[in-house]
Image (cartoon, helix red, strand yellow):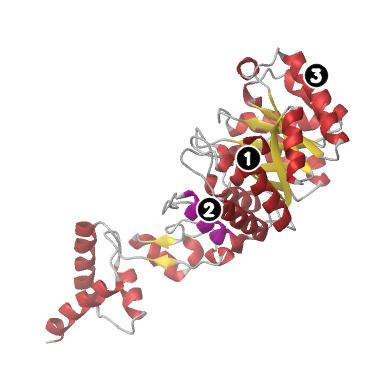
Amino acid sequence: MAFPQHPFDIDATIRAATKTLGVNDSTLRDGEQAPGVSFTLDEKVAIALALEQCGVDEIEAGTPAMGDCEIEALTAIGQTVRDSAVIAWCRMSETDVDATLRTGLKRASLSVPMSERQMRAKGYQGPRDVLARIARVVRYALDRGLTVAVGGEDSSRADPDFVPRVIEAVQRAGAHRFRFADTLGVLDPFETYGIFYRLRANTDLELEFHGHDDLGLATANTIAAARGGATHLSVCALGLGERAGNAALEQVAVALERTTSWRTRIDFTALPALADTVAAASHRPIPVSQPIVGEAAFSHESGIHVSGLLRDPETYQALDPTLFGRSRRIVLGKHSGIAAVRHALSEQGLDLDDEQARGVLDRVRAHAEAVKRPVAVEELLAFHAALTPSMAA
């Protein structure tokens, strides 16, 4: 039986345009807006350099309108970073543009509200006011030498017919990109794909997706946007950001390469160092199960899994940890089997017969259950030493 071709498989026109997607990282802007997170100037520069080392195309480095300290930080980042474009985030106002000019940066992202609710809350007089401000302020910024992108805040809750009108206004004003922001994280991947598929069919403007993780779908939505026709993806290291955070840089970059024909310029081997830098600066430890960079991401305990891994690593490991400068880790715990015990002791130059291995395994399981953590090498050796003399006798 032949199945009908899915739109995911027939977007050849989109895919032919480019195989490489741009990555816009907002760790220093949206990431720092996470509750309780605050970066010093030195930390901001260190994060920016780590992002540059990763191969991020663009760094959305902060909001000049916050004042002199933020302007100083933006200036320092702009003077330090060489290979990534540094961008200032602004509201759609001349005063924000003027603040950007004080930083010495040459690129700005100007934000407008897209939903009626956001328009009312931010003092806009409705859709016509949004379009009028785009025309006025984008031109104001361009006339002062800035390269301008426009961000549509709360685009996912906007009138669907209004989004194309804004994109037309953005292009007419001379901006090079429109960012579609799922500001409250309300989309699912199917909706996201459909939105970008339709937008791409009607414009050749650069399109960026900015996704929040309130439903745990930010990374999936970002991949869907790429499939649908986005040219740029907005992310944050470790998924840092307001409320539940944003799409995680490391997850998006790796998932794109594993699940699509798209690529980014991200250097996977630099991702762990970036994660460590951001975690330290934000005072938010990396969850052990965090994909790609978490301590347990390439750790295995289950006896069935370990037995298979020792025969063929790809049995239970689709991602090669060496891609990220990491290695596979087999831990001993409640769910370990004899193969794991034999492997761990063989690495210490010790061998066991079946009866000895079973005795050590029983102790490993009991101890792991009691202490609720993996069994350390020293503890394993103690179990071995305690059991082997009596067994040998």
In the image, the segment drawn in magenta is 271-282
- Which circle's residue, 1 or 2, is located before the other in the chain? 1
Q: CA distance from mark 3 to mark 2?
A: 39 Å
Is residue 97 shown in magenta?
A: no
Identify the residue under disc 2: 278
Residue at 56% across / 27% down in the picture?
A: 186
Residue at 79% across / 25% down in the picture?
A: 134
Secondary-structure class at tag 1: helix
Q: Amino acid at mark 3?
A: Ala
Estimate the x, y position of residue 325 in percent, counting from the top left: 55, 67
Estimate the x, y position of residue 266 in percent, counting from the top left: 67, 56
Identify the residue under disc 1: 222
Is residue 280 shown in magenta?
A: yes
Q: Are marks 1 and 2 in contact (CB under 8 Å)?
A: no
Viewer-side label of 1, 2: 2
Say whether residue 359 is left or right of residue 178.
Answer: left
Residue 79, by quadrant, is: bottom right
- Return the residue nearer the eye: 249 or 72: 72
Secondary-structure class at tag 3: helix
Q: Main secondary structure of the magenta part?
A: helix
Relative to residue 223, is residue 381 depicted above or below?
below
Residue at 70% across / 49% down in the picture?
A: 75
Q: Residues within 10 Å of mark 3 (few under 14, many from 20)?
A: few
**Residue 96 visible, this orientation:** yes
Relative to residue 180, is residue 375 depicted above or below?
below
Secondary-structure class at tag 2: helix
Relative to residue 81, is residue 165 depicted above or below?
above
Identify the residue under disc 3: 132
Q: CA distance from mark 3 to mark 1?
A: 30 Å
Say whether residue 18 is left or right of residue 276.
Answer: right
- Which circle's residue, 3 or 2, is located before the other in the chain? 3
Q: Amino acid at mark 2?
A: Val
